[in-house]
Image (tube, coloured by chain):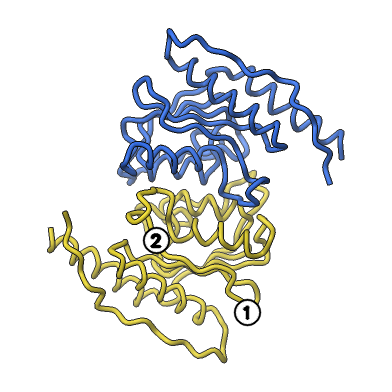
Chain colours: A blue, B yellow
Amino acid sequence: MKKSIECPFQKVFPSQLEKGDLFFMQLAYNEAVNAWTRDEVPVGAVIAMGEEVVASAFNETRTQSDPSAHAEMIAITMAAKSVGDWRLNDCRLYVTKEPCPMCAGATVMSRLGEVHFAVDDPKMGALGGATSLHELPFSNHKPKVFRQTMELECREMLQAFFKLQRKST
Amino acid sequence: MKKSIECPFQKVFPSQLEKGDLFFMQLAYNEAVNAWTRDEVPVGAVIAMGEEVVASAFNETRTQSDPSAHAEMIAITMAAKSVGDWRLNDCRLYVTKEPCPMCAGATVMSRLGEVHFAVDDPKMGALGGATSLHELPFSNHKPKVFRQTMELECREMLQAFFKLQRKST
């Protein structure tokens, strides 16, 4: 049994005056802090439509004992309910780590307009890292992908989490 | 608004004496019938551990207005709860159509031991069709993939569904 470790990172309080990509990624970062405080791998996700947040979630795989309960999956389900349509073409996903194959696949299936992620994952990332599911040749939908907003902060949090987890075992 | 069309396919009643791959795919086929009767694209999925069914589900994207409510995703979540572990290494998924990128990704993330699918999908299938998520070079887990059990029956049902849908619009 791994020991629970207090999150050494603080939430940020972005200005409400400039609701650009940094603003929404900061909200996703705060969700990653929420994940850590519940002993989950700290990944957070926010979905925005225009200037409005339509979904906000963090990784809950451990809490829910569900391998599909990644932050992005929960946020996509939430956004579809919130928008009242499973097609999320007008929405943008902000997530602190490059989506895995499941979540990247979900961004294609839900027709998400844009995906912004902070930290690359060359091992299991599926939007340019290990594979490129947003560029499948016969796909009806190809989300636009943007990377590196808040990369340093999100990477630092993930690395610290895994380092402390290894120490505590 | 599309008109609802009665399902012209009957459920099958497999013998309980031989619980091989055909048996479990027949149960998945029955779930596809369940999907059709609810106006959903007829895809069904069953997860087995040894001779026991630990999850059984059908596509519910329309009913739930959730782009992630594919038969495989629902079955994986259900199996993890049923088995009491998110790692499904000892489980086998039977599904009537080749999994999409999201669902194929979920078979990797949940460490499913085997995936058996009936109908190939060269356009969006992600276990050999349009891409091969079970063969990502750096992945910790590579599910074994088997194809074509009950291929004709499952293909006939999918083709009939889409043909009748086009006619009814």
Can residue B146 be seen in this snapshot?
A: no
Q: Amino acid at mark 1?
A: Glu
Q: Are marks 1 and 2 in contact (CB under 8 Å)?
A: no
Tell me where residue B1 sits by quadrant: bottom left
Looking at the rendered image, the disc whose residue lies closer to the viewer, 1 or 2, is 2
Q: Is residue A48 above or below residue A86?
A: above
> Percent position (x, y) of residue A33?
65, 26
Q: Is residue B4 above or below residue B125?
A: below
Residue at 42%, 70% in the rendered image: B118
Q: Nearer the viewer, residue B151 or A33?
A: A33
Dot 2 corresponds to which residue?
Answer: B59
Dot 1 corresponds to which residue?
Answer: B51
Which of the marked residues, 1 or 2, is nearer the chain's N terminus?
Answer: 1
Q: Amino acid at mark 2?
A: Asn
Residue at 56%, 37% in the rendered image: A125
Spatial distance from mark 1 to mark 2, Cα to Cα?
Answer: 23 Å
Q: Residues within 10 Å of mark 1 (few under 14, many from 20)?
A: few
> Percent position (x, y) of residue A56?
50, 32
| Helix, strand or loop at mark 1 | loop
> Percent position (x, y) of residue A82?
37, 37
Residue at 64%, 72% in the rendered image: B49
Residue at 55%, 59% in the rendered image: B76
Query: Please, which chain is the residue tagged with disc 2 on?
Result: B
| Helix, strand or loop at mark 2 | loop
Tell me where residue A20 sits by quadrant: top left
